Image (cartoon, coloured by chain):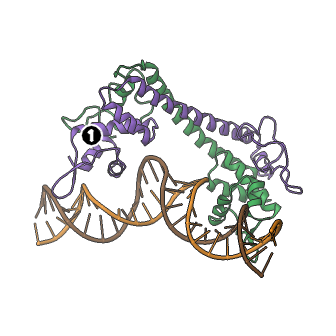
Chain colours: A purple, B green, C orange, D brown
Amino acid sequence: MNIGQASAASGVSAKMLRYYEEIGLLPKAARTEAGYRVYSAKDVNTLCFIRRARDLGLSIERIKLLVGLWQDRERSSADVKRVAQEHVAELDAKILELTAMRDTLQELADACHGDHRPDCPILHDLEGGRPSPSRRSIVTNDVGRGEVTAAGLPAQCHAN
Amino acid sequence: MNIGQASAASGVSAKMLRYYEEIGLLPKAARTEAGYRVYSAKDVNTLCFIRRARDLGLSIERIKLLVGLWQDRERSSADVKRVAQEHVAELDAKILELTAMRDTLQELADACHGDHRPDCPILHDLEGGRPSPSRRSIVTNDVGRGEVTAAGLPAQCHAN
DNA sequence: CTTGACCTTCCCACGATGGGAAACCCCATC
DNA sequence: GATGGGGTTTCCCATCGTGGGAAGGTCAAG
């Protein structure tokens, strides 16, 4: 089985196969005399494992851990669960972040009449206009808020 | 006002200031005789606009559009709104994707007893184990599902 | 033997950001 | 006037995971 077939069978691109090998996620593949990489059904199995893990958004680093645990008969499921839960926590954080952005932006878009006139609450907000009710502090990190940086400068622009 | 002060006043790192100039998001800054970049209060204003847009997750490309509209008195708010809504749509898609991952992984983690024993539904699933109820098709793209790629190969591994 | 499909390695690109080196500039203090 | 510390300049490299493409070798079918 050469790289193209392994790729087709696993759903991982040949490019990624070489990359995974390079970074040590996969062991160095055997080679034919001509230098072609050769894969076994077991290799394809591992590749499928990796692909599914990537589908779940796991980083290469964590996948390395999981593959290690997977191949370790002495593993404790607690270790696996911990890795999974760390990733869930990261996903949760990201989802929260994106949702805050989405909500803010949607709110602004809703307030925009969206016609030929130039007035626009979206631009007004980005410009640093007064936090229209509820905005500010949803998305921005609330550090150092309160004092103005330099005299004469646009007051809404404070270092954060 | 040199780059450090503009950076502090706007909350955009000096590194990013140079980068934004390089890629054309900002006009080339004026220079002192010694070659130091010089920024005006108006420049800082633009920088704040950009920073807030970045806080909302907008791409540089879209921020370019928005800055252009912002500075165009003839703009129509519809154009601004469209840009915002495109971004909301992208955020929604990303949130959906991450949420699907999160839910799947959380489900698997919940099913894992997480003790010293090696048995683990997480690994079992990644291994390509039967789609435990409801899994599969939440996260993976459902293309080409149905037929097995090659004879003798791990059946759960089909090219997608 | 030719042709086309495959494989190899190597380099570059993305997007947005940070790190760091080498060189230069500015200002204050001695 | 010299020295030192902190700012600035440009340039290169790294991230993370992926794709694109070039230049060259290989393999199998016609």
Q: Is residue B56 left or right of residue A135?
A: left
What is the x, y in percent for residue A6? 26, 45
Which of the pair A116/A82 is nearer the observer? A82
Residue B14 visible in the shown view: yes
Question: Furthest residue to the right?
Answer: A152
Q: Is residue A56 left or right of residue B83?
A: left
Residue B143 visible in the shown view: no
Could you tell me which secondary element the residue under label 1 belongs to? helix
The vertical placement of B111 against B56, above or below, is above
Q: Which residue is mark 1?
A: A44
Indicate the quadrant where residue B155 lies. Answer: top left
Which residue is located at x 42 percent, y 18 percent?
Answer: B113
Which residue is located at x 64 percent, y 46 percent?
Answer: B57
What is the x, y in percent for residue D12? 50, 67
Q: Label 1: few (<14), some or many (≥20) within 10 Å?
A: many
The vertical placement of C15 against A77, above or below, is below
What is the x, y in percent for residue B106? 49, 25
Which of the pair A65/B46 is nearer the observer? A65
- Callout 1, which amino acid? Val
